[in-house]
Amino acid sequence: MPWIRKGFKVKQTLMMTMTVKLEIDTSQQGLRMVLKDWEEEALKVFWDDPQKEYTSKLVWDRVNQRLGLGSISRASIINFLEDMVEMGVLSKRETTGKGGYRGIYSSKMDESGFKRFIAETALEALMGDFSEETKQACALFQ
């Protein structure tokens, strides 16, 4: 199947619940097909210790420490975490502290659950628009 060949570049945008988009870049491998390097590192913070809760600042610190970068803004981390909450990957509770309200985030999915979620979401979107063709393509993998 030509659209599965390694290195064949296809970028699809699949709509998630409400406004969250999932972009799949099939020229990449693993989680990099759907996540930027810093986004993957942010989720790994939660997957490394799934029972723990994190503030956006702690996630931001860990991502910049792991990647050796200082260029990932705190706002980018917050926006990504909020997207993951909206998608159901993370949960969030609000607490008050010095300076006002802050979000405390925790994991709702482990890495395997996230990968399955991505696969199910992509297939659901494809079934909605290309039902017959998606069934035929899936049959090739059985």
Image (spheres, helix red, strand yellow):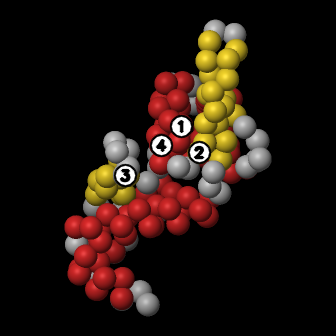
Res. 86 mark: 4
- Residue type at mark 1 is Leu
For the residues labelled 4 and 2, the Cα–Cα distance comes to: 8 Å
The image position of residue 40, as x and y in percent, is 55, 47
Q: Name the residue under label 3.
A: 16
Residue 76 appearing in the image? yes
Q: Is mark 4 on a helix, strand or loop?
A: helix
Where on the picture, by quarter, is residue 3?
bottom left
Residue 20 vs 9, above or below: the answer is above
Pointer 4 with pointer 2, Cβ within 8 A: no
Residue 136 vs 129, above or below: the answer is below
* First along the sequence among labels 2 and 1: 1
Q: Is mark 3 on a helix, strand or loop?
A: loop
For the residues labelled 2 and 1, the Cα–Cα distance comes to: 7 Å
Pointer 4 with pointer 3, Cβ within 8 A: yes
- Residue type at mark 4 is Glu
Q: Residue at x 31, y 82 (%)?
A: 135
Pointer 2 with pointer 1, Cβ within 8 A: yes
Mark 1, other Cα within 10 Å: few <14 / some 14–19 / many ≥20: many
* First along the sequence among labels 4 and 3: 3
Res. 4 mark: none
For the residues labelled 1 and 4, the Cα–Cα distance comes to: 9 Å
Q: Name the residue under label 2.
A: 90
- Residue type at mark 3 is Met
Q: In this view, does 29 lie to the left or right of 21?
A: right
Q: Is mark 2 on a helix, strand or loop?
A: strand
Q: Is residue 63 left or right of residue 28?
A: right
Res. 81 mark: 1
* First along the sequence among labels 1 and 3: 3
- Residue type at mark 2 is Leu
